[in-house]
């Protein structure tokens, strides 16, 4: 935790601040280790404070050992205001891109100035440390095992919601704390919906089924997509599957530190476009994962961010054809100097489940 705090203190120096005010849940947890749902941090060059209410003070003392724990008196905003005034902070950095206007108004009363720091903390979070990598890797192991299980129980006649229930229950049984987002189950023609959350649609013989799901483990997420068939799929869907598989495998094999998000996105996108399905791949190639399911860096045709060692990203090309269906394949990748380490290792071969 100390190295994270030291990085946060560099923001004070770089932006000429007396204090850094952290109000958002993910940034608060990242910089303190505190998992309570209410609280705030104030970090200065010489000390750190964690403010929370009486429900969490004991928990905070155990988790945020690098911080002075301050029990709020009255509401949190009033407590922060008093502390700011008593310590005569003048220039205070805050998460202006997230904090609400009402909160800004409440905190901006006084002689001090609130200065937005942009995504400075989120940029620190992009580079994962050993503990974070271990948690993401464990979350990935859970989804791999859950997918192996699903291939043994999925069948025609089952609804998408039923399949979702089996999948999520298995992840919890395997040690997940929760799902990392609302599980996507899209079968048959609904596969054309990139974010087709599970419905009452019955999975039919010949349907391709796309599962996009993730496990939440010790505060960190995994995110995987696999597409398989229940019964024999159409020739067109097999063709689409093989195109997506080629694009995904090629991108994974070439991703490495020093590339921009645009460069790796283009590798996969060009393969799909050359096969005649460029207009059917409408989303970005991937995104960072960590405490949040979508965080920096991004992999897209607009992303000029440069990949660095210990960034953790998804690579997830897809093709979606209205009225017919779709295919997406996704892995979680740890960026390294000369390549990428794949955390999700479930088979990407086209699985065609035989009907009973």
Image: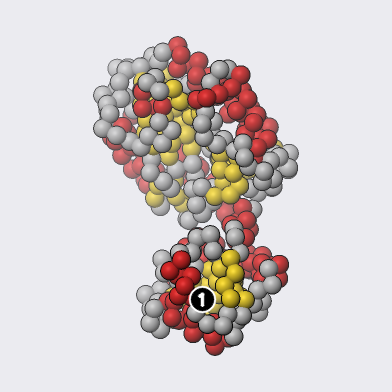
Reading the image, the residue beneath label 1 is: 108
Residue farthest along the top direction in this orientation: 235
Quarter of the image with the C terminus in it: top left
Q: Height in image: 106 above or below 238? A: below
- Nearer to the camera, 158 or 84: 84
At horizontal 50% and vertical 15% (from top left) the residue drawn is: 239
At horizontal 45% and vertical 81% (from top left) the residue drawn is: 79
Q: Height in image: 36 above or below 77? A: above
* Direction from residue 148 to residue 9 in the image, left or right: right
Quarter of the image with the N terminus in it: bottom right
- Nearer to the camera, 71 or 356: 71
- Estimate how packed mark 1 is, as few (under 14), some (14 to 19) or many (20 or more) residues with alpha carbons within 10 Å: some
Q: Position of residue 225 (x, y in %)?
A: 47, 34
* Quadrant in the picture for residue 194: top left
Q: How many marks?
A: 1
Q: Height in image: 120 above or below 216? A: below
Q: Position of residue 280 (x, y in %)?
A: 50, 25
Q: Position of residue 190 (x, y in %)?
A: 36, 27
Q: Position of residue 200 (x, y in %)?
A: 26, 32
């Amino acid at each position: 935790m100390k190295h994270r705090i030291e990085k946060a203190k560099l923001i004070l120096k770089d932006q000429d601040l007396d204090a850094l005010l952290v109000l958002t849940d993910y940034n608060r947890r990242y910089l303190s280790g505190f998992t309570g749902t209410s609280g705030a941090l104030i970090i200065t060059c010489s000390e750190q404070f964690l403010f929370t209410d009486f429900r969490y003070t004991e928990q905070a003392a155990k988790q945020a050992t690098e911080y002075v724990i301050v029990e709020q008196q009255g509401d949190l905003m009033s407590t922060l205001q008093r502390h700011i005034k008593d310590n005569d902070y003048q220039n205070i950095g805050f998460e202006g891109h997230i904090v609400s206007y009402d909160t800004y108004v409440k905190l901006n009363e006084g002689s001090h100035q609130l200065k937005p720091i942009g995504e400075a903390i989120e940029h620190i979070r992009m580079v994962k440390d050993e503990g974070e990598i271990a948690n993401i890797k464990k979350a990935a192991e859970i989804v791999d095992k859950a997918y192996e299980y699903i291939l043994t129980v999925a069948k025609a006649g089952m609804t998408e919601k039923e399949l979702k229930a089996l999948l999520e229950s298995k992840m919890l049984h395997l040690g997940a704390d929760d799902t990392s987002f609302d599980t996507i189950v899209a079968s048959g023609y609904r596969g054309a919906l990139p974010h087709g959350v599970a419905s009452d649609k019955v999975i039919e013989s010949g349907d391709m089924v796309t599962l996009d799901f993730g496990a939440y483990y010790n505060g960190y997420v995994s995110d995987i997509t696999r597409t398989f068939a229940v019964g024999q799929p159409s020739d067109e869907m097999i063709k689409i599957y093989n195109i997506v598989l080629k694009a995904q495998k090629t991108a994974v094999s070439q991703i490495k530190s020093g590339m921009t998000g645009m460069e790796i996105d283009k590798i996969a996108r060009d393969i799909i476009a050359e096969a005649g399905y460029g207009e059917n791949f409408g989303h970005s190639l991937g995104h960072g994962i960590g405490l949040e399911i979508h965080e920096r860096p991004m992999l897209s045709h607009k992303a000029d961010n440069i990949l660095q060692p210990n960034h953790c990203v998804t690579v997830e090309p897809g093709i979606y054809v209205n009225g017919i269906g779709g295919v997406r394949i996704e892995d979680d990748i740890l960026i390294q100097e000369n390549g990428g380490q794949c955390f999700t290792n479930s088979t990407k071969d086209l699985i065609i489940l035989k009907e009973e």
